[in-house]
Each structure stands twice: as C-alpha cells, then as structure tokens.
Amino acid sequence: MHLSAATSASSPASLIEFINLKLAAMGQPICGREEDFATLTLSRSLIASYQEKSRLLVKHLSPVDLAIDTFLRDYLGAELAGPAPLIPVDTLTLDHAGIARVLSLPPGGDRFESPLLKSYRTFNGVLHNPDKDRRTTEGVFHVTEEGLPIPADKKAVPKATFAALLRAALWQPADIMRLPFTAGQPKEAFTWVSLLLRPIVVPEIPGVTKQKRMEIRFFAPGGLCANLDFVESIFGNGGDPFLPENDARLDTDHWSGQTGCVILAPHLTTLRKKDLGLPHVSQATDRQKRDGMCWARDDERYNDGGAFKITCRDNRGVVVTLIADTYFGYCKKEVKTQISFAANLYGQAEEEHAGGAIAFPAYDLGEDFQLSQFFPVVNHTFAELVQRHGARLDVQPDGHAVDRTYPDIIYVPEDAAFNLQGQAITWTHQGAPRTLRLLPAKTYVLPSGYKVEMVKPPTVLRWRLTGTTAEGTFCHKPCTVSGGGKSEISKSIADAMIGGPVFVEDIHA
C-alpha cells in the first residue's frame, strides 16, 4: 500500500499535463490548448477508449466506495428513492500527492476567488483563505438516529432527514463545482474532487502488533479542492482507490477494519427544515424540540442556517459525515474523529481524546552544586558508566567523557562539583584534582543520569545552575472530553512562569 503515488521529482509542469490528461479522460475541459501538450495529443485514441469503458462501467464503484454505498443503502433502507449511487461518482481522483495544490489555482494566474474561498499563490506555496476561518462548537455536531448511542450534548437527527441531506449534498450548485484550475478558460471544468486517506489507527509495536490503518474517502466540490490540499498535507495520499494495491481488504494484516467517508456540502445551510422531513413542533418529541429538529414556520432553515456536520455510523465500522461549512479545521477534525471511532471499535488502541507526557522535575541549583549534598548515597560511578556505555563515549584522559553522537553532552564523575562564579567543574581523578570549564549550551550528565546545565532565563539577568532528575513521572489522560486538557498535559509550563521582583507590603499579613 503506497501512501503517496507521487515522487519528489514531480514538477508543476508535469502535474499540469497529468491533470489535463485526467480531465480529458473525464470529458472535462482542460487548461490551455490541447496542441501544447504532446502527451495529450498522442493519447487521444487511448482517451476515447477509456471514456467508452468508463461509460459502460459508470455504476462500477471502487471497493471502498462500494462499501460506503452498501452501508448507506442498508442503513437508510426505506428512506431511499431510486438505485442511483449514494456517493459522488465520476470524480477527479487525487491519486498523486500535490495534485490538489496545483488544482487550487489556475496555472496562468496567482489567485482564485469565489464566494466561499480565496486562494493566492505565494513565494513558498499557496495561501487559502476560506470565508469561514474559525469554528464554533455550539449546535454543530449532529448524529443520525438508530445507530450507535447519541451523547446528550449532540443533536439527534431522524434517518429520513439525513437521507434528504445526503441527496441534497450530491447536487451541488454549479458555482461551487467550478474547478479553480480551469477558471478563466473559454470552457471551464465543473466536477467533484475526491481523495483516499489511510490514516494510522494502531501504531506498529515491533514484535507485538503490526501497524493498522483505516480508510477514508473525502469528496469535495471542485471549488473547494483547497480543503483536500489541506487534509492531504496532514494525513498523506492513499493513491487511486480503484487499484488493488490500495484496497484495504486485500491487506488484512494492516487494515483496522473501519471505513470512513466525508462529503463537503456548504450549501446545506440553505435548506429548510420542512423540506428535510422534520416534524412540525406540534408533533415533535421533547428531544426534537430541545435540539431544534422541528419547525413552527415554513421558512425555518435547518440548524438556523448555521454551519454543522452530521454523521451516520453504527458498529459495523462505517461512518459517513456531511460537513456544511468551509472551515478547514472541520475537515482535519473529522478525520481525527473517525480515527477515534475506528480505535474504539478495534480495541486495544487509544482514541484521539487521550494525552500523556513523561515529566522530569527540574530545580534551580543556585551557584554551587554537588550531588552528594542532596543525596547522601551516591551509588553510581563513572567507571560503571564507561563499562556499560563505553561504545558511545569518547573518554578523556582527565576522567570525563564526550558523547560521540551529541558532542554537547558531557559525562562527568560522580564527585563533580559545579561552581558558577568560577565557571568551573572540579573532581578528583587518579589522586589529582581535575578541572573542566563550565559552559552554557552544554549538558553535563552525572553517572546517575542527573543533568546539570548553565542557563540564563530570558526575564532574569543572572545566570544559574539547573538540575534535572534522571527518572520522570508518567502522566497520562486515557480519555476526556473536548477541552479537558489532552494536549496541555504534554506542553511545557516554562512560558507560563514569569521571573521578576515581587513586592509584599506586609509580609506578616
């Protein structure tokens, strides 16, 4: 399974020609003139043959798409109307890393603007500025009924309403489908863009378990291919979903067994509750009234016209989410949410809402330090250190050693005494006193693993000695809600500590 079908040698020019080849094979307009692309001109008969085969196989879905479509048909059942596929078909597949970024701007221009997104070419890449650049969590998360239990802080949505939203998501307005790559051409391309992701659910532990990945299909209207550029830059590219080597079902050793799908559909915020099958307030349940899943006026919009994402999932391991917003963060967060879903179903794996750190206590040692002053029993010796780790040390004649990989790490004997005023480290070796100059940007390690450094805090004028213990404390949060402090537990608190004088008017008060 290849996470990126592209090579680092793929130049913008070759990607442009490759994209034009894919557009021509889809029957879409290309960027520029056909005669300017030799490969395209020579491949015209091959493209015609491919188009005819695609027409005959129009209902043939890739393995991952078939799994999603089958799940939706089974889950929604009587709420469906007609045999048409329940996910976008005939999409421009981003099977090479970097295609999404090239698609997000016209090759001959440095900007693309639409009501939903503004993109600009910069010296070091592209700048995408969607019309929604921040998120809100109030009333955003909706879950379809009759699947897994719905938490009390989420909005419960009837299956018929999800089915109506899904049908509407597959019919995007033309202005959203316009591909930036061909913007400004006499004929412009209007198409769906799709991406296959294979994010890690279970990291590999050598000798214990193999790496496990889930599969996620991402669909976006052509005008929002920048969203897929953002997602791809974080989670990588899973290649062409039609190729056997990218089919998770054929690699059971490394597939977690879960499948996800995300469809971007920002126009869903314009739909009316009444048209989506929600009941009148007089016929609504208490929870529907609480969640706003009913209407009193004909013109009431779903979710009051605000951004939302609605998900449909059960314990079979397939999850489908519609995102009615352009905020890039929702795309990233939804992938992380689906990874959590997969981890919970797979078991023996941490969900994303977990965090941890190994904390090593550090102390201000003042201007003088010797380990025996703090710990009466110093039972680790420099001789033992050399015996155990001699292969990674350059032992010096005066009785200290330098790390061969990291020369800024200095190993000193157990009786080493540090003096900041004299900027010296002293000890006894072979009956004679030895001295080493104490320098900043060096880490001095005693045989016990205790580290001593010469540092100057940014808010304090004087230098000082700091010591860090060799054994840390493992802090772990196995599970908590959003805002519960998963990431904070692994962040340094150094920037939260302010140095400076303190005035106390009455110290005895």
Image (cartoon, rainbow, N blue to C red):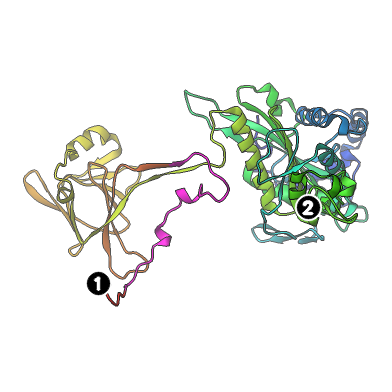
Residue at image coords 18%, 45%: 413
Marks 2/1: CA–CA distance: 58 Å
Q: Is residue 199 visible?
A: no
Q: Secondary structure at mark 1?
A: loop
Q: Position of residue 259 (x, y in %)?
A: 70, 31
Please tell me in which quadrant of the rendered image residue 218 appears.
top right
- Indicate whether residue 201 is drawn in magenta: no
The answer to which image quadrant residue 367 occupies is bottom left
Whether residue 318 is visible: yes
Q: Which residues are magenta?
A: 476-502
Please tell me which of labels 2 and 1 falls first in the chain.
Answer: 2
Most foreground residue, 363 or 95: 363
Horizontal and vertical percent position of residue 91:
83, 40
Q: Report the residue marked by disc 2.
A: 303
Q: Position of residue 304 (x, y in %)?
A: 79, 56
Q: Which residue is mark 1?
A: 508
Which quadrant would the N terminus be assigned to in this image?
Answer: top right
In this rendering, would 398 be left or right of 57? Answer: left
Instruction: Write down the quadrant of residue 495 in the picture.
Output: bottom left
Mark 1: which amino acid?
His
